[in-house]
Structures are given as structure tokens and as C-alpha cells.
Image (cartoon, grey):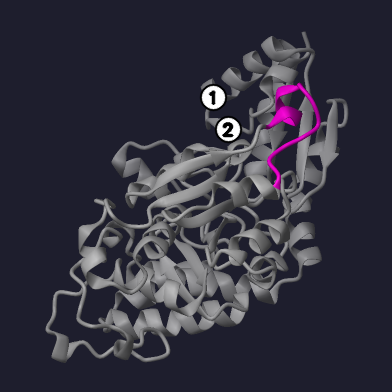
């Protein structure tokens, strides 16, 4: 394990068996991705030209009318919120996050609320919750229904938010139907939904107006990168609220395929989405990762991720591992109870190198090993650590 850079900084290198969590710096980039980032850093370009080129690739990959490279899925959500609130009105763009007098309500499903929807509020929107998640509360089987979304739509509604997951209710098609009946756009938060690759296109195909993806999770791009794709005018609005626009109107000459200058009464000021910018290296890395993701089949990707899990399971065949399928395969390690899982988890954090597992189900006594952020040799490091720690922590 090469620790020369981090060693100089005094920062210990970890084994990331949790997955592409930002707090753990995401994954290990493929050499093609890092090479593209380095190559991009060696020259200067007009960022309008680079963004336009990225928009074309993103649109082709997602089936959307337009696309935008951003600094992450949360950035994409903030920009989506801003775009739905102000459209192509430069005066309204200049006011955000002050949304008084604007369409500023985003209808959201109560069971889909999460900390990341703070990004939508960051643009000045107010979230309007609908539905009761009886199925999660143990009080029944129902969740939000389409008629509740429709009842919440009013004159101040800017958009409807739908957070993609296998358990999301109501289905996206029903959400799109009621929202579009009132000419209200639908934003889909699909940050962590890749793979499979089909999901790159499925949300736009289902009628979503804007879709946010993380670039640094299943896509394998830089951690601080993301995609916003969807309707041409809304992505255009998002781009205008993110780009550096400190230039004269007469000098503003964007590629029409990306931004249609003829639809604007004047040049907006630098907008609320300015902190969401992606630099040239991140855009180059994102596009390279996107091409690699599309070139590799889902089966090939799964097999590549499955290999280190198979090694761990074979070397530790006396441990209670259970394979878990899904877009990203995992190994579940079942302990006696939550206290035992906590002891082993903390012991792995005290180990050198530090090993992070997914402890999202620790209370049930389960820890997970995810393969998508493992570096070369990390599978063996996990094996060595568990051989030492399991008899003392997990096996008692």
C-alpha cells in the first residue's frame, strides 16, 4: 500500500470496506480516470466549451435532453431546486436563496426524507411533506399515495421530489403523472442507484424532468463529481446558476446545444449554485468514468467486485458469512447481537491499518463488507485482521 503522500501529511491510509462514503474519501480511482484528470490539469480551456462537451456525453448516456457535470449529487440537487424555482429568469436567479414571491415549495414524500434534501433547501426552497409511512412505523402497510402528492400541489409548487430506491412509494410513474398534470417538474434523487447501468436512462425514460447522480459512487468517478440531467431548459437554468458569468453580455457566446442565449433577456449574475462547480480535472475524470462504466457490462462489474469477497470467504470459511446480492454485492457477517458487532467493529477501527465495515445494521448484529472501494491487497488485510480479532471479539 503506497502511503508516501499521505505519510508525508501524517494521514493514515485505511481499508474502506464500507463503500463509497464521502467521509471515507470514496473509492480508488481507475488509472484511466486519474490519467484523464492529470491530462486535463495540464492545459486551460474555456469552461463553457468543456461543459458543453460534457453535456453532450451525459445526454447521450442518459437519454436526457441536456446534462451538467457538477461537484456531486448534493450539488445537483441544489441546482435542480434552483432551476425549478426560477427557470430562465435572470432577475429571479439573482434573488435566490431569497424565494419570496417565487414558486418555492417542493413536495416531498415523508418516508423519503433524508439529510441530503438539505441541498434543495439550500437554494431557498421549502419542503412540503406528504404521506404517512405506516409500513416503516409498524402501524400498517401504507405509505404516501399519488393523490396526496396531487393535493399538496398549489400555486407555489416548484417541483416534486422523488428519492429513488427499491422501496420508494408511490412508483415514479404515478408521481410523474400527477405532477405533469399540473405542469410541475419532477426531480429524482438517484445519487446511489448505480449500478445497474440501465438506471442511467430509466428515470428520464419514466418522465422525470431532472435526475441527480453521484459521480463518485457506483460510477467510479471523482468523489467530488456528479451529474444532473433532464429537460433542456431546466438543465440550462442550473448551468447558468453555477457557471462563472463575470463577463460582458456581448462576450457571452455559449455553444447553443448547451445554453441557448436567445432565450435569455440578459446575462445572469453569478448564482446560488456557484459553490457547486466542477473543475476541469473532475469533469475529465467523470466523463472517463462514465465511458468505462458504460463499456463494462453489469455482469463483468459484478464479477470484478465479487472476486475479493470470494477470497475473504474462502480464507475465513469458518466465519458466518452470507453473500448478499444487489447492484453492489456484499458479504454479511452475522454476530450474536449488537453488542458483539459493536466490539468487533471498534476492534477493526483500532487495528492497523484501520478497517471500516458497513455497520448500518449493527443493532441486528450484522456487519457488511463491500468490495467497490477496496484497493489491491485490502481483501488479504481484512482476512489477516479477522483471523486475529474474530476469536477475541466476534467469536465470544
User: In whole angstroms, how far apart are the C-alphas of marks 1 and 2?
Assistant: 7 Å
Quarter occupied by residue 301: bottom right
Q: Position of residue 27 (x, y in %)?
A: 54, 51
**Left/right of residue 74 with respect to residue 277 in the rendered view:** right
Q: Is residue 299 magenta?
A: no
The first of marks 1 and 2 along the sequence is: 1
Q: Where is residue 300 in the image (x, y as percent from the top left)?
A: 78, 66
Dominant secondary structure (helix, strand or loop) of the stretch shown in magenta: loop
Q: State the residue position of label 1.
A: 349
Please rate how many residues cluster around mark 1, counting C-alpha atoms within 10 Å: few if below 14, some from 14 to 19, many from 20: some
Q: Specify whether 316 is left or right of 100.
A: right
327 w.r.t. 31: above or below: above
Q: Toward which corner of the image does residue 251 lie, by quadrant?
A: bottom left
The answer to whether residue 264 is above or below residue 102 is: below
Span shown in magenta: 133-145
Secondary element type, mark 2: strand
In screen coordinates, is 313 left or right of 150?
A: right
Query: Residue 382: x percent and y percent?
Result: 67, 34
Q: How many numbered markers are drawn?
A: 2
From this view, report whether residue 364 is shown above or below residue 284.
above
Seen in the picture, residue 389 relative to 279 is either above or below; the reply is: above
Residue matched to label 2:
356
Q: Residues within 10 Å of mark 2 (few under 14, many from 20)?
A: many
Per the image, label 1 sits on a secondary structure element best described as helix
Disc ID at residue 331:
none
Q: Residue at the location (55% across, 45% down)?
A: 108
Q: In what quadrant of the picture does the C terminus appear?
A: top right
Query: In this orientation, which residue lies closer to the viewer: 181 or 121?
Result: 181
Q: Are marks 1 and 2 in contact (CB under 8 Å)?
A: yes
Is 67 displayed left or right of 124 in the figure? right
**Front position in the image: 290 or 60:** 60
Amino acid at each position: 500500500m503506497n502511503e508516501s503522500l499521505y505519510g508525508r501529511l501524517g494521514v493514515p491510509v485505511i481499508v474502506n470496506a464500507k463503500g463509497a462514503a464521502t467521509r471515507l474519501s470514496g473509492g480508488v480511482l481507475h488509472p484511466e480516470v486519474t490519467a484523464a484528470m492529470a491530462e486535463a490539469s495540464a492545459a486551460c480551456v474555456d469552461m463553457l466549451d468543456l461543459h458543453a462537451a460534457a453535456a453532450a456525453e451525459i445526454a447521450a448516456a442518459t437519454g436526457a435532453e441536456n446534462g451538467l457535470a457538477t461537484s456531486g449529487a448534493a450539488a445537483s440537487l441544489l441546482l435542480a431546486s434552483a432551476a425549478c424555482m426560477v427557470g430562465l429568469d435572470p432577475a429571479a436567479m439573482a434573488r435566490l436563496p431569497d424565494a419570496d414571491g417565487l414558486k418555492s415549495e417542493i413536495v416531498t414524500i415523508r418516508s423519503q426524507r433524508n439529510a441530503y434534501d438539505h441541498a434543495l433547501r439550500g437554494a431557498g426552497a421549502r419542503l412540503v411533506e406528504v404521506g404517512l409511512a405506516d409500513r416503516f412505523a409498524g402501524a400498517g402497510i401504507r405509505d404516501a399515495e399519488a393523490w396526496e402528492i396531487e393535493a399538496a400541489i398549489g400555486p407555489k409548487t416548484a417541483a416534486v421530489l422523488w428519492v429513488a430506491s427499491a422501496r420508494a412509494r408511490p412508483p415514479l410513474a404515478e408521481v410523474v403523472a400527477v405532477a405533469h398534470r399540473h405542469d410541475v417538474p419532477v426531480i429524482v434523487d438517484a445519487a446511489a442507484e448505480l449500478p445497474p447501468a440501465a438506471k442511467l436512462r430509466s428515470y428520464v425514460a419514466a418522465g422525470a424532468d431532472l435526475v441527480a447522480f453521484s459521480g463518485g459512487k457506483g460510477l467510479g468517478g471523482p468523489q467530488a463529481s456528479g451529474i444532473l440531467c433532464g429537460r433542456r431548459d431546466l438543465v440550462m437554468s442550473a448551468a447558468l446558476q453555477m457557471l462563472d458569468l463575470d463577463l460582458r453580455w456581448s462576450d457571452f457566446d455559449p455553444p447553443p446545444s448547451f445554453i441557448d442565449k436567445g432565450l435569455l433577456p440578459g446575462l445572469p449574475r453569478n448564482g446560488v449554485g456557484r459553490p457547486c462547480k466542477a473543475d476541469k480535472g473532475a469533469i475529465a475524470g467523470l466523463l472517463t468514468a462514465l465511458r468505462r462504466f458504460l463499456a463494462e457490462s453489469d455482469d463483468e462489474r459484478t464479477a470484478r467486485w465479487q472476486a475479493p469477497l470470494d477470497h475473504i470467504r474462502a480464507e475465513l470459511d469458518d466465519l458466518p458469512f452470507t453473500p448478499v446480492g444487489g447492484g453492489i454485492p456484499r458479504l454479511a457477517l452475522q454476530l450474536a447481537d449488537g453488542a458483539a458487532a459493536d466490539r468487533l467493529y471498534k476492534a477493526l477501527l483500532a487495528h492497523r491499518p484501520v478497517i471500516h465495515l458497513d455497520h448500518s445494521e449493527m443493532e441486528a448484529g450484522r456487519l457488511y463488507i463491500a468490495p467497490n472501494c477496496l484497493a489491491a491487497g485490502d481483501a488479504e488485510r481484512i482476512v489477516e485482521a479477522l483471523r486475529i480479532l474474530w476469536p477475541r471479539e466476534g467469536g465470544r
